[in-house]
Image (tube, rainbow, N blue to C red):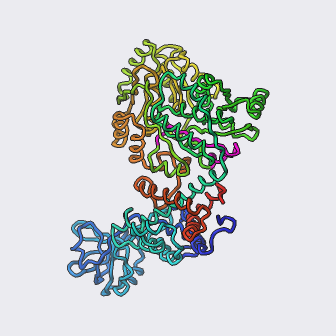
Amino acid sequence: MPEERGRPEILFPLFAGLETLEGIGPKTAKHYSGLHIETPKDLLLTLPVGGIDRSRKRTIREVDLPGMATVEVTVGRHRKPAGRGPYRVEVSDAETVFQLVFFHVKGDYLERILPTGSRRVVSGRVELFDGVAQMAHPDHIVPPEEAAQIPGFEPVYPLTAGVTQKGMARAVASALPRAPYLGEWIDLELLKRKGWPAWPDALEQAHNPKGPEDVSRSAKARERLAYDELLAHQMTLGLARLSVRKAKGFASVGDGGLRQKVLDHLPFSPTGAQLRAIDEIAADMGAPVRMSRLLQGDVGAGKTLVALMALLIAVEAGGQGVMMAPTSILAGQHYANLKTLAETAGVVIEMLTGADKGAERRAKLAALARGDIQILVGTHAVFQEDVEFADLRLAIVDEQHRFGVRERIRLSRKGRAADMLVMTATPIPRTLSLAQYGDMDISVLDEKPPGRTPVKTALISAARIAEVVQHLRDAVADGRQAYWVCPLVEESEVYEATAAEERFKTLRAELGEGVVGLVHGQMPPAEKTRAMEDFQAGRTRVLVATTVIEVGVDVPNASIMVIEQAEIFGLAQLHQLRGRVGRGAAASTCLLMYRSPLGESAKRRLSVLRETEDGFRIAEEDLAIRGAGDLIGTAQSGLPRFRVADLESQTALMAIAQSDARALLERDPVLKSPRGQSTRVLLWLLEQDKAIRLISVG
């Protein structure tokens, strides 16, 4: 790759300072950063969000008022304000008289640009006031011979403080000549089939729309510019995938002995989806290139068993496996779940977290380095420098959205060529999985194992809280357990904790001392763990919690989930919380308590949950309701920020970009062919050079 040489020279004008453009001084240039515009290239990729029809009319009578009109007029008399009123200028078009109205304007300026008796073309919004047609502050006032400079359809740009439409249009016009033909990075067949213009022409057309259809997403020019972004992004992911694969992997092939021992011990048979995923992983691990695979499974789809089978392949092949979780509670749970099964196969499994100190930690590290520990479960403490494996074959990361591409690569470097499996319980719509995990192969668990009871979901108004408490009282008397989730407060964990403590006190008063436990984000870790353990062991019957229980906690006896103010939670989060119940044999319920009145979008979210337990359907709905950025919180999601492309509506384009990028890299991994060379220019143009450096490809 061309990193060492830096950005190609042909792109320099596009990366110059903004003040090199017409009408932008150093002060205005600062304002543009409010639109994330730092260079002429950024400006050119900031496309109009709409347009105004300024086609010429003979008279304002041809316009439905209020509406936009562009007409030629004869200027009549000026009526200066008495006191603080507006300044009015009478004008007449081909059929009627109307007024131009100005506020806070110095009189001599208007006399200069609108001399009585002259002809002018004016364009602006006309409204009726007390039966009189008025155009307040026309957008354009020019002599008829200059009227051609008013576009028939004027683009409207997104603005920020200190940036005007006129300034933006002028800057864009001065930037467009800087966009040369850069070669073609899009597959020529595809380009022809889609009827897309070349890159400079696409920019020219997108900034000079002829009508409303030219500012829609499906306009050819815009579609092409969106595809450029998606292709650059998928190339970056493809290069990441290549760099992982280039590091030769070990072929880890097991004899199946340990796996068989575990399967013989299971009280049920694995689902078809689990067997399929296990086969895909075994095939990847048996190949001489490194595995990079995402295991996506809905709540309760049985990812743990698949993970264990993968770890056992590593052990059968004479190596070690590691599994990482984001919190020590989750790591502890994975450890407990894996331990019983691993030990039936005679495999040594250990846990390592930040809580391990001193001699105990040293002993574990020594055993790990000798190869005496075959499977290690831990938090990100396994990232630390002093953690050495004898022969690490497989690294599994749980709950992927806490890990970006960078961490994936850092972890896989621990083993000289460890295979990488990432697990997520958040079903991800196809577009987002392509955007976030385009560098990985994907296995999906889309069946529930036997023994999971469906969860009945009901909506209940907060006014009926007394009935809910009575329902809990009966359930507790019946030997059952329940979660009570307190509302989520974005801004303040402290407030969230207070809300949880208040609810804890009222429920304790209602249900009795020792029955109710409490866990929230502000508690010291040891207290949190103790509260979770008391609930897991059944010492407390009701657990009042903030969303810390969302991921992974497993208490089969818990069969009731109450979620307060459910209307303020996201769909995916509600689905995750609901997945905490229905893990045992008892019929389970999830009560979504809401405060009236319910808004439209909240009603839609809660109804979707009531209708389905299919996480993939819920994720698609969530994407439709909230949009991609919100769905995973763009800031921490590793989701790219696109200027033109739209993840929700352009799924199909993203899929084409992925297969196109993979095909190009297959044929030309070092991007040496003519198309490869152009693609390098694209990566520099769209500043994917940072990503290329980050993943040290080349």
Is residue 439 among the parts visible in the rendering?
yes
Q: Residue at x 33, y 67 (%)?
A: 212
Q: Quadrant of the C terminus?
A: bottom right
Is residue 244 positioned above or below 456 on the image?
below
> Which quadrant holds residue 343?
top right
Q: Quadrant of the N terminus?
A: bottom right
Segment colored magenta: 406-427
Question: Is 245 in front, or is 55?
Answer: 245
Q: Residue at x 53, y 73 (%)?
A: 183
Q: How many marks?
A: 0
Q: Residue at x 56, y 47 (%)?
A: 636
Question: Is 395 in front, or is 154?
Answer: 395
Query: Percent x, y for residue 637?
Result: 54, 47
Looking at the image, residue 292 sits to the left or right of residue 348; the answer is left
Question: Does residue 167 belong to the magenta stretch?
Answer: no
**Residue furthest toward the front?**
255
Q: Residue at x 24, y 67 (%)?
A: 65
Question: Does residue 419 belong to the magenta stretch?
Answer: yes
